[in-house]
Image: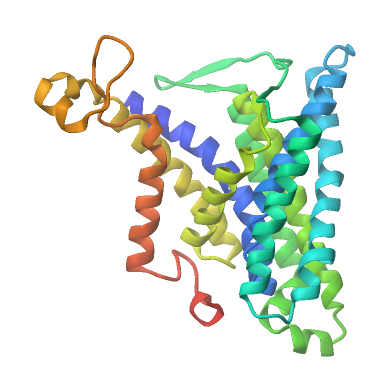
C-alpha cells in the first residue's frame, strides 16, 4: 500500500505537468487542426530562460520564491513571443495549404528551436541551483516534498484558470466559435488571426511555467529535454481526446499515474531475474553483482504508451473526444 500511494503521488506530480503541456497541443489543434510538434521545444526554452535568470539571481540574497518567480516571469513573455512568432511566420502562411505542409513545418520549427538553444546554452546538461530547501512530508507511509506540492497546486490553478478563460470570457467564446467554424466566426466579427495568435501565446505561457516546474523538479535542463516531454504530452492529449480541454487534463493525469505505477511496481520485481535461465532469456545484465533486470524505471514509457494504444483501439476518439474523426 505504501508503494501504491507513493507512486500515485509521483504520478500526480508528473501527470499535472503533462496535462499543462497537453493543453497547448489540444488548444491549437482544436482551433486550426494543427499538431504543433514544436510545442515541446517551447517548454525547453522556458526552462532554459528560467535557469539563466535563476543562476544570475541565486546569490543575490533574494528569497528562493522570489528568485523562482523572477525566472518564471522572464520565461513566460519569451515563450509567448516564440509562440506568436511561430504562428505568424511559420503556420499562418500555410493555413490554407494541404494539411501535411504545416505538419512538416512544425517538425522543422522544432529542429530549428532545438539548435538555436544548442547555440545559446550549449549541448551540456545544465543544473538548476538548489535554492529551495527541500522539505519532505509523510502521508500514510508515503513521502511528498514541498516541491511536489507546489507543482500540483500550481498546475491545478493554471488548469482551473484556463477553464475559466475558455468557458467564461469573451476571448474564450471567440476561441470556441473559431474552433466550431472559422468562416462563420469571421462573418460574425471575430478577428480569426488575433484569436489564433492568442491561442498560441496562451499555450506558450503554459509551456513556460511547465518548463520551470520540470527544471526545478528534476534539477537539470538540456536543449533536447522538450522532445520526449512534448511527445508524452501530445500522447496525453490524444488519450483524453485531442481538441478537448478537459480531455487533455484527464489524459495528462492518467498518463503520469500509469507511468509511475508501472515503473514502481514492475521495477520492484527485478530480483526475480537472478535465476540463470531467466537471466539468459532476458540477456540484460546489471552493473552490480551480476543480477539481471527484467523491467524497471527505464521501461516506464512502455506502460504509458501501451495504455494509450489500448484506449485508442477501444475508443479511437480518446476518452472524452467527440470530433476527432471528422478532423482527421
The answer to whether one can see residue 160 in this image is no
Q: Is residue 17 above or below residue 172?
A: above
Q: Quadrant of residue 49?
A: top right
* Image quadrant containing the N terminus: top left
* Residue at the (70%, 66%) spot, across then down: 167
Q: Residue furthest top?
A: 289
Q: Residue furthest right?
A: 60
Q: How many marks?
A: 0
Q: Quadrant of residue 179?
A: bottom right
Q: Position of residue 168 (x, y in %)?
A: 75, 66
Question: Which colour scheme appears in the figure?
Answer: rainbow
Front residue (pair 101, 255)? 101
57 left or right of 252 in image? right
Q: Quadrant of residue 199?
A: bottom right
The answer to whether one can see residue 291 in this image is yes
303 left or right of 206 in image? left
Q: Residue furthest left?
A: 277
* Residue at the (40%, 22%) spot, across then down: 140
Front residue (pair 207, 282)? 282
Q: Position of residue 312 (x, y in %)?
A: 38, 64
Q: Position of residue 235 (x, y in %)?
A: 50, 55
Q: Position of residue 230 (x, y in %)?
A: 59, 49
* Residue at the (60%, 29%) spot, across then down: 149
Amino acid at each position: 500500500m505504501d508503494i501504491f500511494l507513493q507512486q500515485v503521488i509521483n504520478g500526480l506530480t508528473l501527470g499535472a505537468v503533462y496535462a499543462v503541456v497537453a493543453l497547448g497541443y489540444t488548444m491549437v489543434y482544436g482551433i486550426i487542426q494543427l499538431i504543433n510538434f514544436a510545442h515541446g521545444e517551447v517548454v525547453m526554452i522556458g526552462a532554459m530562460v528560467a535557469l539563466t535568470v535563476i543562476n544570475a539571481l541565486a546569490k543575490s540574497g533574494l528569497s528562493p520564491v522570489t528568485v523562482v518567480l523572477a525566472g518564471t516571469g522572464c520565461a513566460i513573455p519569451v515563450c509567448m513571443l516564440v509562440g506568436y512568432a511561430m504562428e505568424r511566420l511559420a503556420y499562418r502562411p500555410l493555413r490554407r495549404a494541404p494539411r501535411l505542409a504545416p505538419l512538416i513545418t512544425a517538425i522543422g520549427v522544432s529542429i530549428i528551436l532545438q539548435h538555436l538553444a544548442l547555440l545559446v546554452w550549449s549541448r551540456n546538461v545544465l543544473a538548476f541551483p538548489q535554492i529551495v530547501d527541500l522539505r519532505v512530508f509523510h502521508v500514510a507511509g508515503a513521502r511528498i516534498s514541498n516541491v511536489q506540492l507546489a507543482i500540483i497546486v500550481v498546475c491545478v490553478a493554471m488548469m482551473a484558470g484556463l477553464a475559466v478563460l475558455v468557458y467564461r470570457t469573451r476571448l474564450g467564446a471567440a476561441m470556441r466559435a473559431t474552433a466550431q467554424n472559422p468562416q462563420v466566426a469571421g462573418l460574425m466579427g471575430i478577428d480569426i488571426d488575433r484569436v489564433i495568435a492568442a491561442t498560441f501565446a496562451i499555450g506558450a505561457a503554459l509551456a513556460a511555467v511547465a518548463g520551470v516546474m520540470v527544471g526545478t523538479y528534476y534539477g537539470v535542463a538540456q536543449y533536447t529535454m522538450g522532445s520526449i516531454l512534448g511527445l508524452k504530452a501530445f500522447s496525453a492529449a490524444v488519450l483524453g481526446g485531442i481538441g478537448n480541454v478537459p480531455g487533455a487534463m484527464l489524459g495528462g493525469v492518467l498518463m503520469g499515474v500509469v507511468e509511475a505505477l508501472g515503473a514502481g511496481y514492475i521495477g520492484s520485481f527485478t530480483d526475480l531475474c537472478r535465476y540463470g535461465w531467466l537471466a539468459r532469456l532476458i540477456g540484460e545484465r546489471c552493473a552490480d553483482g551480476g543480477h539481471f533486470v527484467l523491467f524497471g524505471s527505464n521501461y516506464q514509457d512502455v506502460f504509458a504508451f501501451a495504455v494509450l494504444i489500448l484506449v485508442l483501439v477501444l475508443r479511437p476518439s480518446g476518452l472524452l473526444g467527440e470530433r476527432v474523426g471528422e478532423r482527421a
